[in-house]
Amino acid sequence: MKKFLTLIIIIFSTTSSINAEEIKRIFVGNKDAKITIIAFESLTCSHCASFHKDVYPQLKKEYLDTGLAKIEFRHFPLDIAAFNASKVSQCKNDGDSEILNSLFANQQKWVKGNSVEEANKNLQKFLISQSFNINFEKCINNKEIEDFVLNDRIDGVKKFKVNATPTIVINNKKFEKTLNYKNLKKALEKLI
C-alpha cells in the first residue's frame, strides 16, 4: 500500500492544479487567533488517535475555546485506508471536525481489513452506524478532495519536512519536543 500511495503522490505532484480555496480546511478555534497550530495526521495512525484522546481535549479547553489559538488539521495519509478516511472527513466541505474527531475516537472500530475493499466496507459501516449522512462512493471518488488531501501531504513534506504522524507545527515552526500536553503548553505559553 505504501508503494501505491507514493506513486499517487508522485503523479499528483506533477499534475495537480487544485485551488485550495475551493475546499474548506478543517479547523477548530478562533480563525484570527495569533497562534496557529497545524496538525499533520493520518487517520489510521494510533499515535494520532492518542493525541486526540489525551492532548487535544485540554488544548481545546485552554487555548482553542478561549480564542487564544486555532488548530488546522492537515492530512498526511500513511496508507490507502487513511487516504479514503481523509477524503470522507473533508466530504461535507464545511470545515467542521465532527467526522474527523469521530474517526479518531473510534479508530479500532473501522481500521481493519486485509484489502482496500474490506477497509472501505468497514469505514462505510462505521459512518452509517454513527449516522453521518454522506454519499460514501461520491466522497472517496471526488477528484478535488483527493487532490486537496494529497496536496496537504506534499506541502507537509516540502514546507515542514514531515516524515511521521502526528507532526505539530506552531506558527510555521515544527514542534520538536515529545508530544504531550505539558510540552505543548510550554511552547504555547511563550507565544501569548
Image: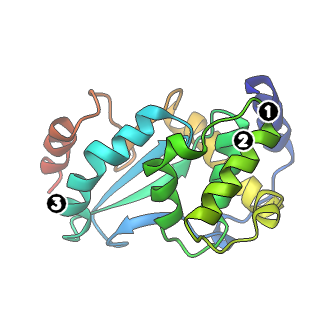
Q: Quadrant of residue 62?
A: bottom left
Q: Residue at x 69, y 41 (%)?
A: 81
Q: Amino acid at mark 3?
A: Glu
Q: Quadrant of residue 143?
A: bottom right
Residue 37 drawn at (x, y percent): 35, 52
Q: Distance of mark 1 from mark 2, alpha carbons?
A: 6 Å
User: Which quarter shows the N terminus?
Assistant: top right
Q: Is residue 18 above or below residue 108?
A: below
Q: Is residue 84 above or below residue 69?
A: above
First in residue order: circle 1 vs circle 3: 3
Give the residue at mark 3.
62
Residue 76 picture location, percent across and down: 59, 41
User: Mark 2 highlights which residue?
Assistant: 119
Q: Is residue 80 visible?
A: yes
Element carrying mark 3 = helix
**In the rendered view, does 59 fall on the left or right side of 23?**
left
Question: Mark 1 falls on what kind of element?
Answer: loop
- The amino acid type of the residue labelled 2 equals Ala
Q: Is residue 177 above or below residue 25?
A: above
Name the mark nearer the viewer: 3 or 2. Answer: 2
Residue 115, numbered circle: 1
**In this rendering, the label closer to the viewer, 1 or 3:** 1
| x 53%, y 63%: residue | 99
